Image: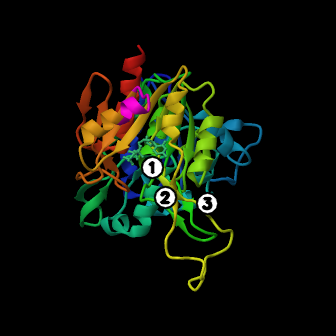
Amino acid sequence: MPLKGKKILLGITGGIAAYKMCSFVRLLVKAGAEVKVVMTPSAAKLVSPLTLSVLTNNDVVINMYPEHSDPENIETVSAGTWHIKYGLWADVFIIAPATANSIAKITCGISDNFLLSTVLACRCPVFFAPTMDVDMYNKPVTQENIKKLAGRGYMVIEPFYGELASGLFGMGKMAEPEIMFDVLKIHFEKKKDLKNKKVLITAGPTVEPIDAVRYISNYSSGKMGFDLARAADERGADVTLIAGPVNLETPNGIKRIDVKSSDEMYKAVIANLKGKDVVIMTAAVADFKPVNVPGNKIKKEDKNFNMNIELEKTTDILKAVGKNKKNFFLIGFALETDNGIPNAQKKLKEKNLDMIVLNNPKEEGAGFGTDTNVVSLIDKRSIKKLEKMTKYEAGNEILNYYLKKIK
Ligand code: CTP
């Protein structure tokens, strides 16, 4: 049983669905997990801490500084460094229900109650189940906060559509305890099949300066590379992520190196190749860069500027790495709007790759800035077209492919 002996920290914030957490705790305890509960003061008004304490056979912590803490009895002391202890104790922290208020505070790093301090202090994976009224859920600020947390590696247990406590219908209903139980089960079942593997990933665009203030670039959001990095990290790999300028948070535990131009990315890749088992280049590296880059801003009236920018090719990083390929598996991406398969096969050969991932930004559900992608995995002998899936799922498929090939 994957949950047996697992240490689950349950954080309950003040949503009406808090009452459902008693059933959730029962499921976990029955499955052999050890459960500790921390609550916000508002949650404690909605569901009885005593009930949860009896069900978990553990103290329930609400306040940073309880009135009657007994320093001799550690079970009753919740002041001082207890948030650190709880944070380090847990194998997983699940916050459910997670209200708009607590989500917003977590996004900003606010830690003005025991539960929030523990979120900041913990080192384990954190799941959260957004639960609130439909309008609160749909507000851009709430959606942005949820996205931000997801980008930082927090795992969202999506709410459902249905009748809410207010009587309104819409999104915001907390996932049922059985579903949250399954989410944790799957989490613990997940294989760490990339343990001891060192992975190097490039992601995002590069920017090629024209002068001191202008540049040439492309629309790459970096999402494919970042989701791939997160997937590899979750599967136990040691991940180095070399990123062009992107607006994304680094998932937990990943070594990120920020670069701007293709030259900087090239240098960073070469400097970090040593000892890698697999190198995956998702970056949309600019193919051309201006030949002359003045250190100042070109003025409109500048007589020497003839309205033409002379360009030269950038170094093809992937090709250079392929040329000197040693003991690592090399995966490239091919972004093609026309003749996808023959072009990708050509790149596979010319860049000496073990596999190439073909994608067409014009295809529905693929391309820059989307959360999904439609890719084909191509090697010397086979072409495997995958369904439309999230970039995170596509990342996992690429990693599965790699593991199958090195067996
Ligand atoms: N790539 C690279 N360095 C470059 C250009 C591309 O490392 N200067 C890598 C990309 O990260 C990707 C692969 O090469 O993994 C293919 O990139 P793509 O843009 O599809 O093809 P190009 O080789 O640049 O050719 P073209 O733009 O003509 O299709």
Horizontally, is 268 left or right of 98 in the view? right
x 49%, y 37%: residue: 318
Q: What's the amino acid at mark 2? A: Ile
Q: Earlier in the sequence, mark 3 or mark 1?
A: 3
x 61%, y 60%: residue: 110
Label 1, label 2: how far apart the Cα atoms are: 33 Å
Closest to the observer, 58 or 223: 223
Q: What's the amino acid at mark 1? A: Ala
Magenta residues, as a range?
Answer: 347-354
Q: Which residue is mark 1?
A: 284
Which mark is on residue 48? none
Question: Is 352 one of the magenta-colored residues?
Answer: yes
Q: Which residue is mark 3?
A: 110
x 59%, y 55%: residue: 260
Horizontally, is 165 left or right of 202 in the view? left
* Whether label 1 touches label 2, CB < 8 Å: no
Label 3, label 1: how far apart the Cα atoms are: 36 Å
Q: Which residue is mark 2?
A: 103
Q: Is residue 302 above or below residue 32?
A: below
- The response on whether ligand 1 sits within 8 Å of label 1 is yes
Give the quadrant of residue 106. Answer: bottom right
Estimate the x, y position of residue 67 in percent, counting from the top left: 69, 54
Q: Is residue 114 above or below residue 84?
A: below
Estimate the x, y position of residue 355 in percent, counting from the top left: 38, 29
> Mark 2 Cα within 10 Å, few/some/many (few <14, many 20+)?
many
Closest to the observer, 407 or 344: 344
